[in-house]
Structures are given as structure tokens and as C-alpha cells.
Amino acid sequence: MIKVRFFAMLKNKTGKEEVNLSVPDNITLEKLKAILKNEFPAIAEFIERKSIMISVNQEFATNTTIIKDGDEVALLPPFSGG
Amino acid sequence: MIKVRFFAMLKNKTGKEEVNLSVPDNITLEKLKAILKNEFPAIAEFIERKSIMISVNQEFATNTTIIKDGDEVALLPPFSGG
Amino acid sequence: MDLVRIQKQDFDINKEVELVKAASKSIGGVVSFLGAGRDISKGEQITMLDFEHYPGMAEKKLQEIRERALKNFNIIEMGIVHRIGEIDIGENIVLIIAAAQHRNDAFMACEWAIAELKRITPIWKRETTKKGEVWVEEHP
Amino acid sequence: MDLVRIQKQDFDINKEVELVKAASKSIGGVVSFLGAGRDISKGEQITMLDFEHYPGMAEKKLQEIRERALKNFNIIEMGIVHRIGEIDIGENIVLIIAAAQHRNDAFMACEWAIAELKRITPIWKRETTKKGEVWVEEHP
């Protein structure tokens, strides 16, 4: 079980702030992205776009990052602070 | 008659803040500098040095600036504001 | 008070500068960047701003920016405060203060820090216009 | 209160920033340079600073810097306050505030203005050390 968090426009698009999701253990972020695209079709195109960053346990992750049980994955639309 | 003002270290060196001086009318600043060097030997070397600026009526002046009766001439050591 | 914070309430620039200046008597130059809510964005009249952040991660990124600034620039101290929640036009949004012995280092560190903040800090701005509310995508 | 001033008393950074920000709701970035009295100069321990200015001309030069900044940079407003008289270590000396729609313009204008202030403004600093009082020659 992992926790998936949505921020800003992605929260609006999915209508969710966070979701607990059962996924195979020790998959790569690349594989998780495919799962998330199926699970949340409303934001599939955003997950595809490079401007969306994904963090795992509050650190920026890449396609090869391994997702473990209990991890917190967050989908981060382009930042606009400052 | 012109007014000559001294600031910072030049005030210390001459022991004066300002002096009224009779000088020929319509002389260049270059000529005035020669007069000032004679008049105030304690600061002759400073007048010679390029780092000293001279203002006439509160505007930076050059050797060719004409000094007229009633002008305010100020000897400005290197600035250190800010 | 922490040098790096995310908070709802407005900040007092005097107090933030004092906090940074307290680090050393050798501080000669303090450069601050203050971001404020502009009334117009891409030609649209803005009536209200609303900032959301990723609690925990956003704070961590700001701390990281301060630490990297202290390491990579010849500065003595840095403070960063970012507001969240609703912010009116003209109000303060963010304050970055860089203090150094000499001004050039403070300018460089401050300029770098605000660019880095925009690049890596999970904070999002929602603008309210007559057409509705829009999440801003600064880097589309 | 004037945007450009020379004064004995300390300034309130919040108030000075508000004064500059009052110029327009389109201000998005405000960059400030604050100069403070350092404790050490060229290896000497400083105990006190004293600033003298050429009354009239110094104010005129600061006004000129503001006007040239407004003309040559894409900024909306600029404020400049310089203190004179005795100033303790750690105290504020000078504040330059540049406000623009975008931060890059504010950074450039502020950095230019403090360099230009040091170059053309008839203000002199006297440092008191254990050895006595010395008029500083920044550009010998």
C-alpha cells in the first residue's frame, strides 16, 4: 500500500487530495506512472507531460526510483511560488 | 569673491570649513586650483591628486569650468558613503 | 523564530532583517527580495491570490536553499519566509534576505535563491480573475 | 515622506518599502539593499562610524540616481535613504529600494544604484578605531 497525494490543479482534476493505493512492491516509478494513468484517467495527460514532477517521500524522483510499501508519492504540477 | 568649502579630511587638514576668497573673475578651475594650492599648502598635494573632485555650485567641474563671482567651490575628497 | 518559514500571516521586514543581521557584526550588506501580489498577470486583472504548499517538503526545500546558499556564496546568513493561503493584491508573498560582508555576494546569493525557490519549492499559486480561478503554470 | 532622503535618525524598512510599493499595484518584485556598519574594516576593529555629507549636493545626487534608475531600468519606483552623523556598529546606514513588475529589473536597478551612490554622492565616512579616527578613502 502506498499513499498518493495530489496538489493544486491535479487535486481539482482528480477531485482527491490523497488516495491509498495497492501496488506491487518494489516497482519503478515508471511502472507506477502507468498504473496511475489507468487509475486516474482525468490526469493521464498531465502524468505524461514532463512539466509534472513526482516526489517519493518528499524527494524528487526519477523513472528508475523504486517504490516501496508505505511510500508517499506526490504528483506535483509546475511550481508557481515566489 | 567666491566661497570655498572643505569636507571630511580636507576640513581637518586646513582647519577650515569654508573660506571666502577674492580671485580674478572668470578664471578657469585649472587656474583656481593653482591659487588654492598657494593659499592652502596643507592640502596642495590633495588638490594635485586626481582622486579629489571639485564641484562648482554643487555640480562636478573640470579644469575648463569657468569660475564666476559668487560661485561656491567645494573640494571633495574620495567619497565613502553607502 | 526560525530563519526559514512558511506561514499564513504577513511578516515584518524589520524583524526578519534583524533576525538575519543578528548572525554577525561583520555583516555590511543585506540584500532582500520581496515578492508582492501584482494586480495583472498575462493581461488579466487579478483580484485575489491563494497559495498552496506541500507541507513538509516545501519547508525542506527552503531549508535546502538556505544551506546551499551558505555553502556556495560568500554570505554570512540567509532568511526565507513564504506565505500561504489567501493573499490580496499588493500584499507580501515572499521575502528572501541575504547578508554578507560585501554587497556583491549578498546580491548574487539573493538572486540565486529566489530563482531556485521558484524552481524547486512545491508551492502553487491560484489566481482569481473575473473569469474564475486558475492555477498558475509558470513553467509550462 | 520623500522617497529620497538624507537623515540622522534610523529608518523603518517596512515603512520605506510601503512608501515605494504605494506607487503601483503592478509591483511584483521589490529588491532592497541595506548597508550596515561592519565591526572590522581592513583588519581594524571599528568602534564607531560618523558620516558627513555636502548638504544640498548630496541630496541632489541621490535624486539624480533615482531619476536615472527610473529612466534606464524597467522599474516602477525607487527609494533611497542615507543616514548621517554617528552610527554604531550593526546599525543601518543606507537603504535603496527598487520596485518593478519583474524581479530581474529590480535586482539590476538596485545593484546599479548602490554602486552609483558610492561613486557620485558627496558623503564621507569616518571610522573610529583604537588608533583614532580615520576618514575612509574607498577609492584612493
Image (cartoon, coloured by chain):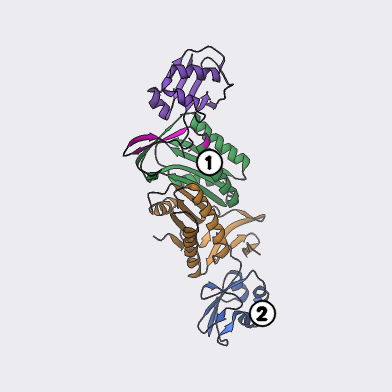
Chain colours: A purple, B blue, C green, D orange
Residue C91 seen in the current view: no
Whether residue D55 appears in magenta in the rendering, the answer is no
Q: Residues within 10 Å of mark 2 (few under 14, many from 20)?
A: few
D47, C45: nearer the viewer: C45
C-alpha separation, residue under disc 2 versus residue under disc 1: 56 Å
Q: Residue at x 54, y 35 (%)?
A: C63
Q: Nearer the viewer, residue C91 or C40?
A: C40
Q: Which of the chains bears the disc numbered 2?
A: B
Mark 2 lies on a secondary structure that is helix
**Residue found 65% across the figure and 80% down from its top:** B37
**Vertical relation: A19 (above or below) C64:** above
Residue range of the region highlighted in magenta in the rendering: C119-140
Q: Say which mark, if any, is on residue B41.
A: 2
| Residue matched to label 1 | C115
Question: Which amino acid, by three-letter code, is at mark 1?
Answer: Ala
- Residue D120 place in picture, x, y as percent: 56, 65
Q: Chain of mark 1?
A: C
- Front position in the image: D89 or D63: D63
Which of labels 2 and 1 is toward the front? 1
Name above or below for residue C88 compared with residue A42. below
Q: Amino acid at mark 2?
A: Pro
> Is C127 inside the magenta-drawn segment?
yes
Q: Taking the image as drawn, is residue D24 in sight? A: yes
**Picture coordinates of residue D35, whole percent (x, y):** 54, 54
